[in-house]
Amino acid sequence: MSEGSRLTRFGQSAMTKLLVIGGLVLALLVPVEMVKGIIHERDMRRKEVVADVGGKWGKEQTIAGPVLTIPYRSYVTDDKGKHSTVIEYAHLLPEQLQINGTVKPDSRYRGIYQVVVYNAALQVGAEFTTDGLGELGIPERDIIWDGAVVSVGLPDLRGLKENSQLVWEGGQYPINPGVGVQSIMTSGINSKVPVSASKKRYRFQISLNLNGSGQIMFLPLGKTTTVQLASSWKSPSFIGPFLPDERVINDNGFNATWKVLHLNRSYPQQWSGGNDKVLESAFGTKLFYPVDEYQKSMRSAKYAVLFIILTLTAFFITEVINKIRVHPIQYLLIGCAICLFYVLLLSVSEHSSFAVAYLVSGIASTLLVSLYSKAVLRSVPVTLTIGGLMSFLYGFLYVILQQEDYALLIGSVGMFVVLAAVMYLTRKVDWYGVSNGDGPT
């Protein structure tokens, strides 16, 4: 046999076809990554819309307070022995802190994007004691009693909807913007309140009506902190280091109760100066939509390579078993049809539910590949087999997408079944004969 004949036979061998298919799979990684880029871009656009709408309505709110801040004189000596007096601030947290509130959710739309917003009506009550000043070692003669300020931290003051009155020991006091001393949060409200050396305990109350978006959080600043929250939102996500002690979630919404002790957190009841550990203890609830079309679209796109390999493998096995030739260009078109499924899934899911989008995209992709395979393979049974395989794969992927805890188990079992089916169908194929050119190409 001449060298030219050997090269011709090698070029027509099934092993060469496998190499070509492998090259096509690698080439199809480019459109797959492009699809992932589109999904990421649309998701970022959605987040920009959420941030923009939230900035106008009210951002995520974290209620930090109340905190009683009392200035005092401190004496320092420099390196030259010169004495001076500076004003420092002692921060006292409440002995008891109780927050009761209702969260009324709502939705705002910007084009095709939906943003979750809420209005929260909160009743905040607390009880303070000034015994913590003695625990800090501050002499009573150095305390500036008439400079006492009580503050409540709020990250977005634009969300406040009413001019509330702060109640301190039964008397009402006007509130001012700002937190006075920025020891916990950089923004909020404050009020100057009367505190004296002769009285140790004080009661605090305030009503807050504020708008926010996404989530609402609380800081467990009390020696005992109790938060009771009710809402008509049916899909809450409880976040932060503390989960509710009691919660009820049903078709009417949710009710949740937290109880946190000062022993459960990493900062004391009183300190002087700043404290950067307070925000780490924030807890609360996030109002979210249980179906995130972008997250599920991205998860499904991660299986694109597997879909391409299995579908092209099915066509190759059909070639080998039925002695039908399929050109590499036809393999490429089939791979492009599979990639198009994810673009359809993303675009349709932005205008309908993910389940409807998946059904429409899956049917369209399956019909496209099945009808094309009928024209290429000219066999109705083989066409039905290809269509059944794609239907099984899309159904299998949908089951995986719905399962968070069992996705890996279902996926590994499914891949085992697929591999077993391939091994069974090709158990009688003479691969040496096929690779030598005796079989179809």
Image (cartoon, rainbow, N blue to C red):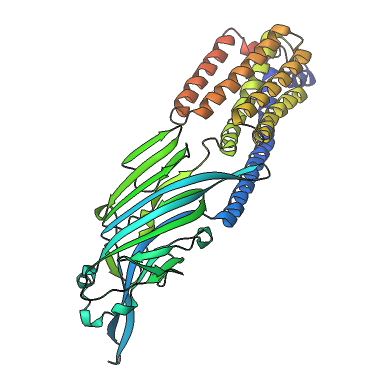
Q: Is residue 353 above or below residue 80?
A: above
Asked if residue 307 lies left or right of residue 367, the reply is left
**Residue 143, visible in the rendered structure:** yes
* Numbered circles on residues, count: 0
In percent of width and height, residue 409 lies at: 44, 25
Q: Is residue 230 above or below residue 330?
A: below
Q: Considering the image in quadrants, where does the N terminus appear?
A: top right
In percent of width and height, residue 314 lies at: 64, 17
Foreground residue among 8 and 330: 330
Foreground residue among 388 and 106: 106
Question: Which residue is depicted at the point 57% across and 54% down?
Answer: 57
Asked if residue 20 lies left or right of residue 295, the reply is right
In percent of width and height, residue 212 lies at: 51, 53
**Residue 243, visible in the rendered structure:** no
Determine the image quadrant of residue 64: bottom left
Q: Is residue 108 above or below residue 1?
A: below
Question: Which residue is depicted at the point 57% across and 53% down?
Answer: 54
In percent of width and height, residue 376 lies at: 77, 15
Q: Considering the image in quadrants, where does the C terminus appear?
A: top right
Question: Which residue is depicted at the point 34% across and 47% down?
Answer: 242
Foreground residue among 158 and 268: 158
Q: Is residue 39 above or below residue 93?
A: above
Asked if residue 140 lies left or right of residue 386, the reply is left
